[in-house]
Image (cartoon, grey):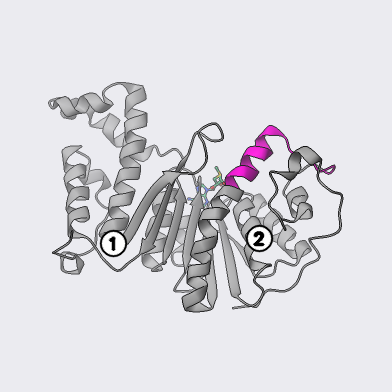
Amino acid sequence: MARRQGTSARTAGKEPASSEKHDIRPGQSVELLKELHILTRDGKLNQDSRRKLKQINHLYQFIEPLLEDVRRTNHSITLVDHGAGKSYLGFILYDLYVRQNREVECRIFGIETRDELVDKSRDLARRLGFDAMSFLNLSVADAIHADAIPQQVDMVTALHACDTATDDAIRFALMKQARFVVLAPCCQAEVAAVLRRNKGKALASSLAELWRRPLHTREFGSLVTNVLRCLQLEAHGYQVNVTELVGWEHSLKNELIMAEYKDLPRRKSAQRLNDLLAMLGVEEELGSRFFTPPEERLIRNEP
Ligand SMILES: C[S@@+](CC[C@H](N)C(=O)[O-])C[C@H]1O[C@@H](n2cnc3c(N)ncnc32)[C@H](O)[C@@H]1O
């Protein structure tokens, strides 16, 4: 694992406009924010970029203590960010954490399928000297077996990774035995599509009223998806916490799922997950996505 190098990113640069100052964290590189087009060349934020900056800086407050936890036990940190897009999260984590903690060996991987975004991120990291960042032009599913990624990963993040990419990120985290998983799920259409297909059969039960109308199918599908994700993580031994990413005014996709591995694979969560799949009539189609550990791994007596 490469040790991080210094960087010339935090140039003296122009000061951001005064109205922007309270959105920028102390020590945050104005030059990086300009490179990411979060700040304009003259240091201004537009409505969209202010929202993005708020989101990522807010997320940083959740992630930083987890990085500190890993560092206390490992002395090195490997983080994989799935569906990285323009890699705002990776770059800002690097700027705020990696560069401020030079004694810690860190590596950040960004996984992204759009090659132009991967090229841009590579180019920016090179120009900034952020040389412990790597960008892989891969799907999340393919990243599980990529040689370039270590067998064990400390933290997995996926911020609004599209549709089932979040589920693939969970699978990735389980395979890599990640200690922390931080997910801000995007719209997920798969469960809703299965509910829609099976609606005829399901309507025999009054429960199906929860998703009979098309708008409710989508919303309920999305809720069910996140509930299944939480149960799956618990069944695999994680302690799960669900909270808001930021206030609703800043983002519609606002759920934040944070999980820490505790090696307590819960029988009850596995049972509940499987019960839910059966009650909703989606067991056959979705059982392999929301897989649970083998029976013998599950803990019998739990609170
Ligand atoms: C809505 S963007 C979010 C980008 C970034 N995480 C952020 O919050 O700014 C989702 C990104 O995930 C990428 N993506 C979607 N499905 C993916 C998959 N299966 N594997 C890897 N990347 C994927 C898309 O190309 C897109 O860049």
Mark 1 C-beta to ligand 1 under 8 Å: no
Quarter of the figure that contains the C terminus: bottom left
**Residue of label 2:** 96
Residue 150, given in percent of the width and then of the height, sits at: 49, 73
Using the image, tell me which numbered label, if any, was put on residue 236: 1
Residue 51 belongs to the span the image colors magenta:
yes
Q: Label 1, secondary structure: give it.
A: loop
- Mark yes or no: residue 38 visible: no
* Image: 54 above or below 110: above
> Which label lies toward us, 2 or 1?
2
Residue 94 belongs to the span the image colors magenta:
no
Which quadrant of the view contains residue 28? bottom right
Residue 266, given in percent of the width and then of the height, sits at: 22, 60
* Residue at figure coordinates x 22%, y 49% from the top left: 273
Quarter of the figure that contains the N terminus: bottom right
Residue 5, given in percent of the width and then of the height, sits at: 72, 74
Looking at this rendering, what residue extends furthest in the top direction? 213
* Residue at figure coordinates x 26%, y 66% from the top left: 264
Q: On the picture, is 170 further left or further right than 206?
A: right
| Disc with the residue nearer the chain's start (2 vs 1) | 2
Question: Marks 2 and 1, how far apart in space?
Answer: 31 Å
Q: Main secondary structure of the magenta part?
A: helix
Which three-letter amino acid code belongs to the residue tagged 1?
His
Identify the magenta region. Answer: 41-56
